[in-house]
């Protein structure tokens, strides 16, 4: 499976509500593109304006005209670009489906350089295979409560949308 993750640190509080409304619609647009299978949005649990969207995709989708005409690759978000203090796009390869994080759960996302370290129960490790490649590996854990202290190179998110499926018929 291929996981597409988009991370933003949004630096314009005066645009944040508008951007979130737009992104909610954009999530539906992307899920109308054949090759996008699931999508879910998150916000950091510490209250900072750091966001992440996570999708299950066919990696070839990024080369399709349908994706490009749907505003993929950031073209649809041009209006908000100056507010992106961080804009990171990574593709990850994993054997497992991405977790469906419920409204009362948290997603711990931790970047690592060690792909051979043993994993704790419930931790999913993914290998970075494309786009910005900001980390060689990323680990995901679904938690019932946020950690008291974050591990190094980790961010804890809460779901701000339910996980959604494709809006097209296969």
Image (cartoon, helix red, strand yellow):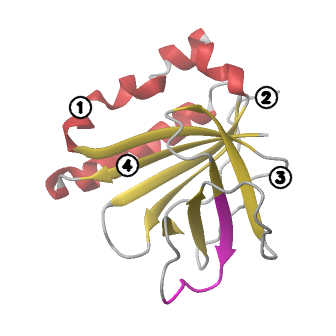
Which sits earlier in the primary sequence, circle 3 or circle 4?
4
**Figure disc tally:** 4
- Is label 3 in contact with label 4 (beta carbons under 8 Å)? no
Q: Which region of the structure is painted magenta?
A: 139-148
Provide residue 54's location: percent of width, then percent of height: 59, 48
Task: Specify the quadrant of the image occupied by residue 131.
Answer: top right
Instruction: Estimate the spatial distance between the alpha carbons at disc 1 and disc 4, rounded to whole Å.
Output: 14 Å
Q: Is 13 above or below relative to 168?
A: below
Instruction: Estimate the spatial distance between the alpha carbons at disc 4 and disc 2, rounded to whole Å.
Output: 30 Å
Q: Is 42 above or below relative to 75?
A: below
Instruction: Estimate the spatial distance between the alpha carbons at disc 2 and disc 1, rounded to whole Å.
Output: 31 Å
Give the camera-side residue of 20 and 60. Answer: 60
Provide residue 48's location: percent of width, then percent of height: 31, 68
Instruction: Estimate the spatial distance between the alpha carbons at disc 2 and disc 3, rounded to whole Å.
Output: 23 Å
Provide residue 130's location: percent of width, then percent of height: 60, 31
Which residue is denoted by mark 2 in the rendering?
169
Which sits earlier in the primary sequence, circle 4 or circle 2?
4
Question: Callout 2: helix, strand or loop?
Answer: loop
Q: In front of the other: label 2 or label 3?
A: 3
Question: Callout 1: helix, strand or loop?
Answer: helix
Which residue is denoted by mark 4 in the rendering?
8
Which residue is denoted by mark 3 in the rendering?
96
The label on residue 79 is 1
């Amino acid at each position: 499976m291929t996981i597409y993750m988009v991370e933003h640190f949004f630096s314009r509080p005066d645009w944040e509500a508008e951007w979130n409304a737009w992104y909610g619609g954009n999530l539906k647009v992307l899920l109308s593109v054949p090759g996008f299978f699931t999508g879910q949005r998150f916000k950091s649990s510490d209250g900072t304006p750091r966001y992440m969207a996570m999708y299950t995709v066919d990696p070839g989708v990024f080369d399709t005209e349908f994706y490009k005409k749907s505003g993929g690759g950031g073209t649809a978000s041009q209006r908000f670009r100056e507010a992106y203090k961080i804009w990171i796009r990574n593709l990850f390869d994993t054997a497992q489906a991405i977790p469906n994080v419920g409204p009362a759960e948290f997603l711990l996302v931790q970047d690592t350089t060690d792909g051979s370290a043993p994993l704790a129960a419930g931790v999913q490790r993914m290998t970075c295979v494309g786009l910005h490649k900001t980390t060689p590996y990323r680990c995901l854990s679904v938690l019932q409560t946020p950690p008291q202290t974050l591990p190094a190179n980790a961010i804890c998110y809460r779901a701000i949308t339910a996980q959604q499926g494709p809006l097209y018929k296969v």
